[in-house]
Image (tube, rainbow, N blue to C red):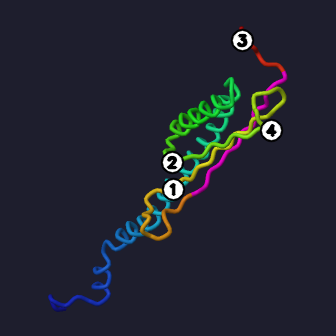
Amino acid sequence: MRHGWVSPVRRRRHDEDGSALVEFVWLGMLLLVPLVYILLAVFDVQGAAFGASAASRAAGRAYALADTDAEGLARARRAVEVALADQGVDQPFDVRVTCEPAPPCHRRGSTIIVRVSSRVVLPLVPAALGGGAPSFAIASEHRVPIGRYREVGP
């Protein structure tokens, strides 16, 4: 046996030392990075959905407790801002208040319908990919009935 000669079997085994670790790290990165991104996107959308739901409930209550429709709309917008900020939603939103059967909303037997809608932009997606950043539409609706009997101030 010569000192400079290494058998081909031994050379092949020696060339692959540590490759399992490298493959594990690369496969881990290839699988974990998309999984983490998907989880971030789902958490953002879910937080916005919770925020929209809480915002429509709070806006409905604020609108119903106001004395006039104009004051109710201002209170409803402020309630939506607070509820969405509480969930960390900083996207623009739209508040629509309608009544059944017809305005004015603050009369006996009517129902106030508050709809809050917004869009959640997916995180870490540049707008340079074309067509703007992808987003999800979020909407929530809440109905508040106005009772037959209302308290009247002095």
Tag on residue 153? 3
User: Where residue 99 sits in the image (x, y, percent)?
Assistant: 77, 38
Mark closest to the chain's N terminus, 4 or 2: 2
- The image shows residue 130, relative to residue 51, as above or below, that is below
Residue closest to the far top:
154
Task: Report crowding for label 3: few under 14, some 14 to 19, many 20 or more residues within 10 A (C-alpha).
Answer: few
Q: How far apart in space, not on screen, are marks 3 and 4 (Cα)?
A: 25 Å
The residue that label 2 is drawn on is 91
User: Where residue 148 sits in the image (x, y, percent)?
Assistant: 84, 23
Look at the numbered discs 1 and 2 and tell me whether their residues touch, using CB distance below 8 Å. yes
Q: Is residue 144 left or right of residue 56?
A: right
Mark closest to the chain's N terminus, 3 or 2: 2
- The image shows residue 11, relative to residue 92, as above or below, that is below
- Tag 3, which secondary structure? loop
User: In this rendering, which labeled residue sits more in front, label 4 or label 2?
Assistant: 4
Q: How far apart in space, not on screen, are marks 4 and 2 (Cα)?
A: 31 Å
The residue that label 1 is drawn on is 121
